[in-house]
Image (spheres, coloured by chain):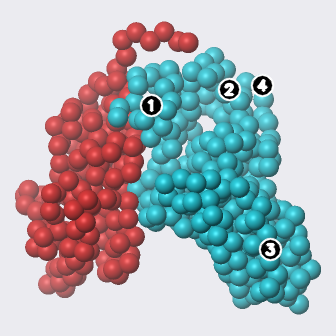
Chain colours: A red, B cyan
Amino acid sequence: MTDRIIPKTYLVELDVNGKTCRAHVPARTTLVDFLRDELRLTGTHVGCEHGTCGACTVMQNGKPIRACLAFAVQLNGEKITTVEGLCKADGSLSILQDSFCATHAQQCGYCTPGMLISSQYLLNQNANPSDSEIREAISGNLCRCTGYQQIVDAVKLAAARMANEEQA
Amino acid sequence: MKSAAFEYARVGSLDEACELLAQYGDDAKVIAGGQSLVPMLAMRLLAPAWLIDVARLSILQQMTVTEDQGVIGAGVRQCVAESDPQLNQSIALLRKALRWVGHTATRTRGTIGGSLVHADPSAELPLVAAMLNAVFTAKSTRGLRRIEAGNFFTGPVMTALEPDECLVEVSFPLWRSGKTGSAFEEIATRHGDFAMVAVAAQVSVDPSGRCTRAALGIGGAGPVPHAFADLAGRLIGSRLEDGLLREVAQEAAGQLEPTNDLQASAAYRRHLAGVLAERALRSARQEAAV
């Protein structure tokens, strides 16, 4: 057995929402704890901490990942987008975020950051998703208020608004 | 829960990984995508002193398709394998199975090798490896070792890998003669959750419609994925008639020894296995006929 004394820390440097962030953390610090506790970006929520609920979903290089299933040290040098990074440059809500408000797609709000990341990734890949495509895209995100219908409505509304904006 | 404390080493080469594994043995775990390992750490089912990160080793990222085999590096991300046109064309079954592996967000980081070495009895990739007789290549300071799928999965979340071995690649035999069709069927509580039962089938037919090669496997209904080589062999030479497919599916289900759990009773699992096996064999036949 290797001696375990004081856990050593590792320098982690990430690009988070376009800003370079660094901190010294123990190896066991998950990405979600790094974001919340070190960077104080508390928009990303911690749910089950073992990859089931999807509340902590963020993007790594534009693709969704579970922030509780990656240690920050593994992601050194990577580009991370959190729910805070989805908003417009002036800090106002994105079309998708605003659509969540418009359709009452958040009840308690716990799952919302993960839902937003999963839905935004879907819209980035597919500008006009069907109901079943939306449901599959958020199948890895649990909503215990069971507000799925409004979330599907929100994603559809956002897709329509984005299409309108492109035409305008 | 949070993982217990560990030390972390990102290695620059496979040899370095093997040296660390030789040094620490059971006290070390290899991590690449971590999508199976990190939940085990979070639940403290495992508490290794060292994590050896092999995710960025380019030697583990290779995908090669030759005349008779498709070789996938252990570190290839599931999302990468899923969208690789060459792989999809040569091992179509793999893509069908990958659709069921976790969720989009876990396939971004999860690797082919990680899912295989985790060896969850209900996991999709071990099932495909077992039924297609894939060959695993592992490396240690003692050298390279090749292990056939039939000897690789030894029990629930247990494999033939020694504590000092690192999986390098897995090689799937390609079925190049005649027309080949495949199908993957699964029932889970929620798409992306652990399968109650999963079935994979693959058949080849000659121009006259006679079956020349067949494979059938069932996962989630025993300690390891079950490949039914003898039963599938009975299909060879036939025209894959409905009655025969049903008979083989039912016999396969009858050979299983599933267990009861919160999700499903043993009897329900056996029933599902028979239904899904028949469905998978029919879909594979249909695809081969096109």
Please state which of the two labelled residues, at mark 2 or mark 1, is closer to the viewer: 1
- What is the number of the mark on residue A92? none
Please state which of the two labelled residues, at mark 4 or mark 3, is closer to the viewer: 3
Splitting the image into 4 quarters, where does residue B54 fall?
top right
Position in image of residue B119 (x %, y %): 63, 46
Distance between mark 2 and mark 1 Cα atoms:
21 Å
Q: Are marks 1 and 3 on the same chain?
A: yes
Q: Of marks 4 and 3, which one's residue comes earlier in the chain? A: 4
Residue at (66% x, 65% y) in the render: B270
Please state which of the two labelled residues, at mark 1 or mark 4, is closer to the viewer: 1
Position in image of residue A119 (x %, y %): 29, 66
Q: Is mark 1 on a helix, strand or loop?
A: loop
Please state which of the two labelled residues, at mark 2 or mark 3, is closer to the viewer: 3
**What residue type is disc 3 on?**
Val
Question: Dot 4 corresponds to which residue?
Answer: B142
Residue at (64% x, 70% y) in the render: B271
Position in image of residue A137 (x %, y %): 37, 67
**What residue type is disc 2 on?**
Asp
**In contact (CB < 8 Å): disc 4 and disc 2:** yes
**In contact (CB < 8 Å): disc 1 and disc 3:** no
Q: Is residue A157 above or below residue A86?
A: below
Q: What element carries label 2?
A: loop
Question: Dot 3 corresponds to which residue?
Answer: B248
Q: In this view, does B105 lie to the left or right of B156?
A: left
Q: Is mark 4 on a helix, strand or loop?
A: loop
